[in-house]
Amino acid sequence: MVGLSKETNSDEIPVNIVSENEIDSSSEEYDSPETNADELLKLLDLEKQKSSNYEEKLKYVLADFQNLTRKTQSDIQNGVNSKIDEFILDFLKIYDDFVRAKEVFTQSKINSEGLDSILKNMDSLLKKYNVIPIDALGEIFNPNFHEAISIITDPSLDDNTITKEIRKGYISHERVIRPTLVEISKKG
């Protein structure tokens, strides 16, 4: 029978035999369970700190995003309101022309029923878009709502009393889009 070499025998499993002396000396290389647990606790604390830092960063990013969202919505709303106000101001010029035409027809005793119904429709449109007229006659002058273009002397009235409305003013979205042009009084 031919002898097989160790290299060609595939059924053999190499085994290293270690003596007791070697086991004792090699155990010093490995950490004790207490040391291993301490390292794991340190790693856990480090990961908790990292997690806390990421959570803080996430909170700041979320707050920035919410602020950006609010600002963007506000900018869009202001842009839309600005365009609506611009349109309403153009519309009010036409509205004023209709009011003057109605006054001329009424003074000339011409039938103005057609103009009355158009003005009612225009009033409904203004109301629908929250455009509110500023009532000024008899009020005290307020520069936030009125623009004085003339002054009359009248000792019977208090100073800055509005005696005449020259052009109607309007408020839209809680801000003045067109101040009322007025005449005010002065005592003397």
Image (tube, rainbow, N blue to C red):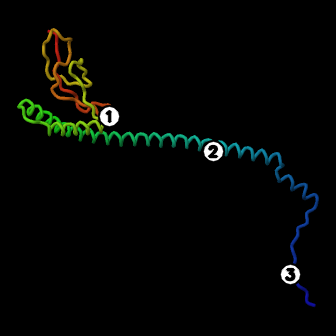
Q: Which residue is mark 2?
A: 51
Tell me which numbered mark, 2 or 1, is placed earlier along the sequence.
2
Q: 187 or 23, which is in the foreground?
A: 187
Residue located 17% across and 18% down the image:
163
Q: Gap in Å between the C-alphas at discs 3 and 1? A: 95 Å
Say what amino acid the circle numbered 1 marks. His
Tell me which numbered mark, 3 or 1, is placed earlier along the sequence.
3
Compared with 176, 80 (above or below) is below
The percent position of residue 89, horizontal first and vertical second, equals 22, 37
Q: Which residue is mark 3?
A: 9
Q: Of discs 3 and 2, which sits in the foreground?
A: 2
Say what amino acid the circle numbered 2 marks. Ser
Disc ID at residue 173 = 1
Element type at mark 2: helix
Compared with 45, 25 (above or below) is below
The part of the image, by quadrant, that contains residue 184 is top left
Element type at mark 1: loop
